[in-house]
Image: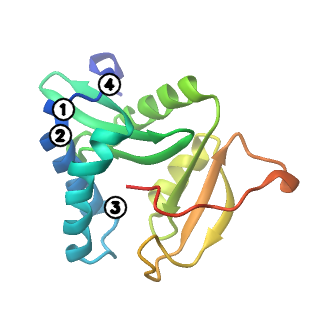
Amino acid sequence: MEQKRIEIRRYEPADNACLTAIWYQASCISHPFLPDSLLQEQRLQISSKYLPETETWVAVGPAGPVGFIGLIDLFIGGLFIAPEWQSRGIGSLLLSHAFDLKGKLALEVYVANQRAVDFYRKHGFCGVRRRETDDNGLPYPLILMQKPCPSASRRTPTSSSRSF
C-alpha cells in the first residue's frame, strides 16, 4: 500500500495525454473482450470529451499521474489505474475520495470484468440492474452498481452513454 506517496488533485489540461494513455493501457487489460478498433475510437473520446468535460480527480505519484476517477454528477464514468500501479490501494483511495465528495455513487461495470465487480462489492457497492448490451449496442452485459445500496422499491433504470 503506497497511498502515503499519492496526492489526489483535480484534472489539469496538461494531464490529458498521460491519463488517456493510462485509460488505454488499463482498458486493454481489463476489457480484453472489446475489439481494439472500439478501444481506439473510445480513446479519442476520452481525450477530447470525457477528461476535459467531467469532474476528474487524478492520483499523482512521485513521477506524475498514476490513475484517475471521472465523475458525472453522482455517476462514476470511469476509474482507471496505470497497470504498474494497480493493487497498491490507489483505486480505493480515489473511490473513497469520490464518495467523501458525493455521499452517494453509481457506476456501470462490464460483467466480464470480474476483478472490477469484486473491487466495487468490496467497497460497499451492490448490483442494482443488469443490461445485456453496452452503450454501443454490443453484446457485452453491464451491471449497474450503487453505494449505498438502494431498497428494492427505490431502484431506478440505468441510462446509457455515461461510462468511459
Q: Which mark is residue 13?
A: 1
- Residues at circles 2 and 3 in contact by the CB criterion of under 8 Å: no
Q: Percent position (x, y) of residue 145?
A: 62, 53
Q: Residues within 10 Å of mark 2 (few under 14, many from 20)?
A: some
> Which circle's residue, 3 or 1, is located before the other in the chain?
1
Q: Mark 2: which amino acid?
A: Asn
The label nearer to you, 3 versus 4, is 4
Q: Which mark is residue 16?
A: 2
Q: Mark 3: which amino acid?
A: Ser
Q: Percent position (x, y) of residue 14?
A: 13, 31
Residue depicted at 58% across the width and 61% down the height: 159
**Which quadrant of the structure image shows residue 81?**
top left
Depth check: give the residue in front, 136 or 144.
Answer: 136
User: Which residue corresponds to mark 3?
Assistant: 30
Q: Could you tell me how far apart the alpha carbons at marks 2 and 3 are, in whole angstroms?
A: 21 Å
The answer to whether 38 appears left or right of 152 in the picture is: left
